[in-house]
Amino acid sequence: MDQKPANIATDEEMAAEKPLKPSLQKPPGFRDQQNPPTSEPPSGTATLPRRRPRPIHPASLYPEKKRRWSRCRVFCCCFCIVVAVILLLLLIAGAIFFFWYSPKLPVVRLASFRASNFNFSSGKTDDGWSFLTADAATMLDFRNPNGKIGFYYGDSDVAVILGEKDFETNLGSTKVKGFFEKPGNRTAVIIRTRVRTQQVDDPTAKRLRAELKSKKLLVKVSVKTNVGLAVGSRRIVTVAISLKCGGVRLQTLDSQMAKCTITILKWIKLRS
């Protein structure tokens, strides 16, 4: 009976001597994996995981990205700039040239056509072929309407054709020496062609003979040459051109000259 109070006192002394541990506060969003919460979310709703907040750093801590230009890109940019400057200068120079000189196209006309010794000789009996022998003189009229610009004409290849459609016949071709035409000048070029024993079928020979006699024969002249512009004694530029003259009948050509068409770069057609 006397020992019980002593034991009680001893327990109280031990409790007084043991230090108390402070309770730790849990951070927001903390979940205890050993004791998960028993409460379930209401049906029909899904729990979304929380995203960790992204740390915000001052702008001075982010490294700046250096732009590196490759050599190929720099070369392409410089090349494009140079080409653009050259084209701009050419446009300005061309505008000044056209404004100052007012260039005009040369005027070319088919002036006349004369045929001599125009004969057909028959071949073998009933073979359907004849042989043409003829001499022709064709005159082209060149006129320069410019007051400050001259024209250089190079050596020209000229061909003369008679007839139309299926009855066309080549009356020979020749080469004409080049010449220079001064500003405001007019030049007549006589082209002489000839054929000897050229084979022609009988229907064509018969039609050409009849049309030449009635002056209904169609005459065409084709010219291929180079033309250069000249200011004073300096030649500026030279281009290849082709001329198509005529396409008219002899009776019309006796009263007026036939116009020519100038073709530049094989697809630009201009009426002179």
Image (spheres, rainbow, N blue to C red):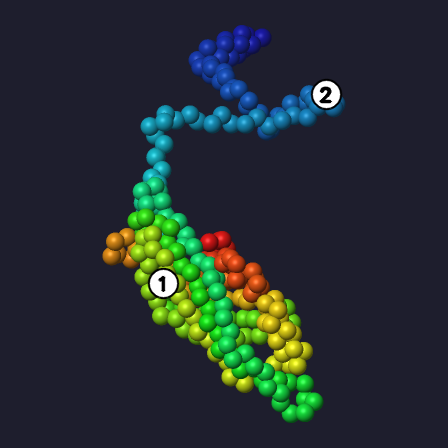
Q: Which quadrant is home to the N terminus?
A: top right
- Residue for point 65% across, 25% down: 47
Q: Residue 84, image x and y in percent?
A: 36, 45
Q: Amino acid at mark 1?
A: Tyr
Tell me the quarter of the picture where residue 19 sits. top left
Residue at x 54% of width, y 85% of height: 197
In this rendering, is residue 148 above or below 154?
above
Residues tagged 1 and 2 counted as in contact (Cβ below 8 A) = no
Q: Residues within 10 Å of mark 2 (few under 14, many from 20)?
A: few
Residue tagged by mark 1?
153
Which of labels 1 and 2 is toward the front?
Answer: 1
Residue at the extreme right of the image, as rendered:
43
**As rendered, which of 27 and 98 lies closer to the eye?**
98
Q: Which residue is mark 2?
A: 42
Residue 225: horizontal and vertical position, in percent? 41, 65
Q: Is residue 163 above or below residue 124?
A: above
Residue 32 in percent (x, y) is at 58, 26
Q: Residue at x 49, y 68 (%)?
A: 113
What is the CA distance from the residue labelled 1 to the residue labelled 2?
A: 101 Å
Front one among 243 and 86: 243
Q: Residue at x 44, y 66 (%)?
A: 139
Under mark 2, the amino acid is: Pro
Residue 75 shows in the view: no
Q: Is residue 162 visible?
A: yes
